[in-house]
């Protein structure tokens, strides 16, 4: 079996490319409402930060860096990895207050989004740097507001669609559900393991493998427990909601995605239970490695969902809910290119991964890739229509319900978010460079 | 009426659907229940388990030994070199025991000739495919004597075994014993070269009586078993 290559460099390209393109498209979409524009900037910068985070990992894995012979515990790329991750999580913490149902609607609070994100990111980045990232797992609780806000929105609009016959309410529940998957997708695939309460054994194994230090793991474990539990309830809630909807409205793409994740979580939970002896070996004997088939399963499910499909979901939100003006003449060609490019990158990566463990010759995998390209070209119109044609703006729906305040807020004040994130990027790079030089 | 953006109004809008609220409350209660029992397992129970690993436990490992012996008596002619093989698979090593060290004693007794001058005897343990610590600094693989004294040779077979009890720091007994539960050491045959050089006074043995020597080779195979105690 060939050695499996990492998806991380591909994820770095996908996230970064999508983030930069979204920023360009947003700058050409001046006619969007404040919540669309602010949400667009937040998503774009979160994508860029994730892209930079994976780029840092990719560079660190190159033979060039390995040959540098760095022996210190932390190097610049590790600092960059953690710092950009924290910055992305800080955006994710504030994002549900803006989209799809803005909790912050007063101009005074909207103006605080940029400085708050900036300061929260910087404060956590510096504190984690000074404590050598011992408690970095704790900050996963930043995802808790997503659950608390998005679940009521999902159920409110799902109920309105199902009980009151308001078909336009679907776009709200769909947006809330998609954002829940984008935020909790990875942990959703562990729902059965969390329900059986066996994830703690995996967490303990990781702690022992990492080398039990002289500090408490409790803050990290609070973070893991909160995010795993909320993700479990989120996927079960979405499954319940989509089952209800599918009974009367039929199955659609989102229903399939939900049940796919549910199925993956079911199989993963059984697999996790089956390898518990191996997990516990660290405590009672000596750490044994997981079977290769178990690692392949997680690579194709949890890892692929996080690295490849989460950015596609964000792209779906940006395009389908008209966050960016994809209909505008100047945006159309770029939107089409980026959509096809993203789908092709993800498809080719999955084919390459399959080839790494299946006895498929490169001739056959090339032929499969050619078929995928042909399908994407042939169905380009159809794919674009599915993404853009049926697109309905969330902000317009909220306006029609008279639930969206239109505050007096200027374009410059919205763009302040983008500018502050640009400054934050520069500060992170300089800070990581200086700090890694000092401590090494 | 257009929204004024107040937080209270926004929250009342989000929770304006009764059916939706019921689902939400069920989800939140389920999340709280899940958080409570998984939180207990992770934060409280696992913390106790992990605290056992926070500092390595100290273990004292002692060895019980049992010796197996083999002997070979060879008569060598002057200037003769001979090779003797001791097949270790011929030994019956008790269950739970491993071969630690092989000790060889080569003795010769000068009883012939006019002057009863001691002959030169040399012994070498020859490196072969016997699984042992061939490069260990404590080994004595070669010896030579011309004063009728025994020659002592030693080969360490099991890594780091010297018969002395050791203290180790480890997370559990299994890991503490890991270095002492290896298999595969001491497989093969011990190969020994013997060399004789008959010595006569001034190199002269007028009646040619002292032309050979009887050499006894005693091989002691030290086997050990391990016992462990947390200190």
Image (spheres, rainbow, N blue to C red):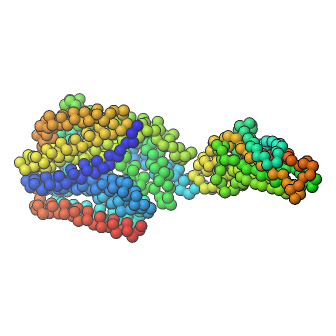
* Vertical arrangement, residue A44 with respect to residue A246, above or below: below
In the rendered structure, the answer to whether residue B37 lies left or right of residue B20 reads: right
Q: Nearer the viewer, residue A416 or A74?
A: A74
Q: Residue at x 44, y 62 (%)?
A: A71
Query: Horizontal and vertical percent for residue B166?
Result: 68, 55
Query: Horizontal and vertical percent for residue A234?
Result: 31, 43
Q: Residue at x 53, y 56 (%)?
A: B54
Q: Residue at x 42, y 56 (%)?
A: A219
Query: Horizontal and vertical percent for residue A387?
Result: 15, 41
- Give the tally of numbered discs: 0
* Vertical arrangement, residue B192 with respect to residue A52, above or below: above
Dividing the picture into quarters, in which one does residue A172 lie?
Answer: top left
Q: Is residue B221 visible?
A: no
Query: Horizontal and vertical percent for residue A238?
Result: 28, 39
In the rendered structure, the answer to whether residue A6 lies left or right of residue B47 reads: left
Q: Nearer the viewer, residue A177 or B86?
A: B86
């Amino acid at each position: 079996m060939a050695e499996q290559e990492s998806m991380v460099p591909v994820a770095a390209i996908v996230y970064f490319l999508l983030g930069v393109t979204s920023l360009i498209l947003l700058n050409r979409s001046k006619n969007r409402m404040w919540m669309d524009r602010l949400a667009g900037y937040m998503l774009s910068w979160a994508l860029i930060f994730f892209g930079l985070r994976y780029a840092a990992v990719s560079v660190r894995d190159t033979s060039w860096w390995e040959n540098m012979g760095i022996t210190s515990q932390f190097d610049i790329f590790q600092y960059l990895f953690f710092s950009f991750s924290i910055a992305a999580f800080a955006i994710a913490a504030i994002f549900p207050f803006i989209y799809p149902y803005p909790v912050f609607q007063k101009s005074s609070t909207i103006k605080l989004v940029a400085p708050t994100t900036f300061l929260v990111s910087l404060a956590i980045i510096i504190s984690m740097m000074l404590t050598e990232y011992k408690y970095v797992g704790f900050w996963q609780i930043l995802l808790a507001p997503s659950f608390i806000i998005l679940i009521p929105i999902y159920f409110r609009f799902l109920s309105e669609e199902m009980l009151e016959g308001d078909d336009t309410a679907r776009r709200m529940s769909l947006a809330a559900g998609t954002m829940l998957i984008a935020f909790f997708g990875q942990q959703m695939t562990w729902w059965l393991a969390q329900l059986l309460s066996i994830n703690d054994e995996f967490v303990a194994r990781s702690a022992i493998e990492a080398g039990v230090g002289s500090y408490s793991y409790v803050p990290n474990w609070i973070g893991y427990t909160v995010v795993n539990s909320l993700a479990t309830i989120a996927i079960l809630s979405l499954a319940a909601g989509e089952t209800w909807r599918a009974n009367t409205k039929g199955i659609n793409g989102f229903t399939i995605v939900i049940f796919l994740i549910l199925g993956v979580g079911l199989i993963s939970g059984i697999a996790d239970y089956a390898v518990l002896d191996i997990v516990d070996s660290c405590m009672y004997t000596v750490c044994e490695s997981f079977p290769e088939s178990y690692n392949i399963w997680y690579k194709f499910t949890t890892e692929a969902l996080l690295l490849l499909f989460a950015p596609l979901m964000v792209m779906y939100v940006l395009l389908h809910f008209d966050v960016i003006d994809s209909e505008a003449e100047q945006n159309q060609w770029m939107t089409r290119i980026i959509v096809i490019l993203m789908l092709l990158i993800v498809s080719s990566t999955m084919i390459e991964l399959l080839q790494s463990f299946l006895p498929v010759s490169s001739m056959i995998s090339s032929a499969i890739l050619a078929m995928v390209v042909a399908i994407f070209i042939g169905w380009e119109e159809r794919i674009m229509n599915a993404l853009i044609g049926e697109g309905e703006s969330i902000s317009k729906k909220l306006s029609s319900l008279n639930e969206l305040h239109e505050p007096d807020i200027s374009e410059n004040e919205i763009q302040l978010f983008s500018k502050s994130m640009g400054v934050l990027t520069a500060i992170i790079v300089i800070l990581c460079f200086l700090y890694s030089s000092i401590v090494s | 009426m257009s929204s004024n953006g107040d937080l209270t109004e926004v929250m009342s809008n989000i929770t304006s659907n009764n059916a939706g609220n019921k689902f939400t409350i069920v989800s939140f209660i389920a999340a709280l229940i899940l958080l409570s029992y998984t939180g207990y397992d992770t934060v409280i129970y696992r913390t106790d388990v992990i605290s056992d690993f926070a500092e390595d436990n100290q273990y004292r490992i002692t060895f019980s030994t049992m010796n197996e012996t083999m002997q070979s008596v060879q008569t060598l002619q002057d200037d003769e070199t001979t090779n003797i093989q001791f097949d270790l698979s011929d030994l019956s090593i008790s269950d739970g025991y491993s071969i630690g060290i092989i000790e060889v004693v080569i003795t010769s007794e000068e009883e012939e000739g006019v002057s009863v001058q001691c002959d030169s005897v040399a012994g070498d343990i020859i490196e072969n495919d016997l699984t042992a610590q061939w490069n260990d600094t404590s080994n004595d693989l070669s010896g030579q004597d011309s004063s009728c004294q025994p020659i002592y040779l030693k080969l360490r077979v099991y890594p780091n075994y010297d018969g002395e009890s050791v203290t180790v720091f480890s997370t559990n007994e299994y890991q503490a014993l890991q270095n002492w539960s290896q298999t595969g050491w001491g497989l093969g045959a011990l190969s020994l070269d013997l060399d004789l050089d008959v010595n006569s006074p001034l190199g002269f043995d007028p009646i040619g009586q002292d032309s050979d020597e009887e050499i006894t080779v005693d091989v002691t195979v030290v086997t050990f078993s391990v016992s462990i105690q947390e200190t």
